[in-house]
Image (cartoon, rainbow, N blue to C red):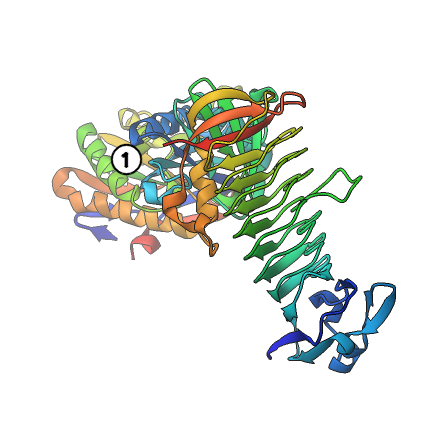
Amino acid sequence: MIINGVTIDATFAEAFPMKATRAIITAQNEKWAMISAQAMTGFATSVIACGCEAGIERVLDPSETPDGRPGVSIMIFAMGGKGLAKQLETRAGQCVLTSPTSALFAGIDGGTRIALGKNLRYFGDGFQVAKLIDGKRYWRIPVMDGEFLTEATTGQVEAVGGGNFLVLAESQPQALAACEAAIEEMRKIPNVIMPFPGGVVRSGSKVGSKYKSLGASTNDAFCPTLKGATKTDLSPEIESVMEIVIDGLTKEDIDKAMRVGIQAVCDLGAANGIKRISAGNYGGKLGPFHFHLQEIMA
Amino acid sequence: MSALTFTLKHRPDQRVDMSPLVPHLLENLEPVQIAALELQTGKRKVRVDELFTISGSDTQAIIIKNSFAKLDFIGKELQGGSIKVEGDAGAYLGFGIKSGEIVVDGDVGLYAGCEMKKGFIKITGNAGDFLGGALPGNKMGMKGGTILVKGNVGERAGDHMRRGNILIEGNAGDYCGSRMTAGTIAVMGQTGRFLGYAMRRGTLLLWNQPQLSASFNDCGAHTLAFLPILFASFKKLNSKFADASVAFNRVQRYAGDMSEIGRGEVLVKLG
């Protein structure tokens, strides 16, 4: 398959079941909601070493938030429910509770309930106040700038993590420009996050390493400087490869995000140095979710 | 199916225990069986059809017409469905109600919503003392749900209240929120003496400055983030509380009762 001069490989991305949750952070203005959201989703690019994958889903209009203030919706993904709950709680405690004027609300009404502010209330040292409003429990925790308002719980749902595609380009600036264009479009899709810095990862990995202590190492088949030194997957004109990783609530959400992302890359086309779109997989043996690039773009 | 309607034929001299006439107890009964049920009035029992004319068949929507202030225990331990009272109601309206809705067109007596668990009670007129309170000697009053009173309420509203909302459009008598464990009482009108007497936790939300006891301490003026969410939850009510223009988030906060654990609060509208 070729779109605008870009070859779409007959391969697939392989993704895994994960647990996910969503929270809504509001503040006096969008600037401070975003600062808190960025802190809460920081150092959360990959479960390999961060414990979770997190990202900003979108900015919310005051009319969409529970308290009518500007807000940001964030999502956190982890391999298990316990790990997710722990990450959510520590991040909420260190990054939202601490952030001036912030308030924290559930972003998923259904699902398994996990603690959002339920345990942060103890920070109130006995001065915290519970309010049950319309069946939802809130905690009002006295803090130095006034009161931190947080919903007690949020929902945890089954999700999919690790959807991805690779952008193969003739130069590094062209690969990055294409990925930026893709991310801009993908951020418009609900229920997905792209957890890596700016949504783009330049150090895609393979499973295993020559060093026993490492579970993952550089994806040498896609490293352009190793074209002559390893069993490469790159043709001579490829000088740079970048990857976009997507976590989403459902396979369909990731499908949608991949489609608009790949389309944005292909719109730039061969004329802008984009040669191929590929994807990372483990032979289909590890993850139950397969995203076949050509099917997605058909 | 039209609502099961009980129209009072005459006003008995003695008080009447209406607790058998609730949807969950009438659910599988034929009209003749309902007519044959006995109600306690004074020291004797009378058949339902001796006191009421019965019409309609929907046991999940009950209407009591020509009601007056001696019909007690209407909607006792209601478990779903609705009861509409046309006229006044006696004491213990909605006693221990678990779910469902009771609407009274007129005034109600003592202990309305007493030890209520959940559900909704709307009183168009005035309510007597111990609204949403606990029975004498009991430690737990209302534990959930909402009581909306369009008129005034008597003394000790929300006595020993544990959770839920009491919304009063009119005035509240003395000892409003006394011995509260938690929950919210909102009063748009005036409040009486000894407000929040011995309250432990909970919120008294007021539109007018009360006369506060010395055991309530001023915590200053604040903008509280939970208030817009609380007011938003009132929007579905057919009440002044649903009106966006009455909502506020700027309050003077008083903590008390300091003679108890002092974790309660009186929030008074500012500006």
Where's residue A18, x and y in %? Answer: 51, 40
Which of A128/B77 is in front? B77
In the image, is A206 to the left or to the right of B130?
A: left
Per the image, label 1 sits on a secondary structure element best described as: loop
Among all residues in the image, which is located at the extreme right?
B43
Where's residue B6, x and y in %? Answer: 67, 74
Vertical order, B129 against B39 (above or below): above
Where's residue A39, x and y in %? Answer: 39, 24
In the image, is A4 to the left or to the right of A11?
A: left
**Tally of numbered discs:** 1
Q: Quadrant of residue A199?
A: top left
For the residue marked with disc 1, what is the amino acid? Answer: Leu
Residue placed at 66% from the left, 22% from the top? B261
Chain bearing tag 1 is A
Where's residue B17, x and y in %? Answer: 78, 62
Among all residues in the image, which is located at the extreme front?
B13
Regarding residue A98, the answer to whether it shows in the image is yes
Vertical order, A124 against A4 (above or below): above
Vertical order, B8 against B203 (above or below): below
Q: Quadrant of residue A53?
A: top left
- Estimate how packed mark 1 is, as few (under 14), some (14 to 19) or many (20 or more) residues with alpha carbons within 10 Å: some
Say which quadrant the C terminus of chain A sits in.
bottom left
Residue under numbered circle 1: A234
Which of B251/B43 is in front? B43
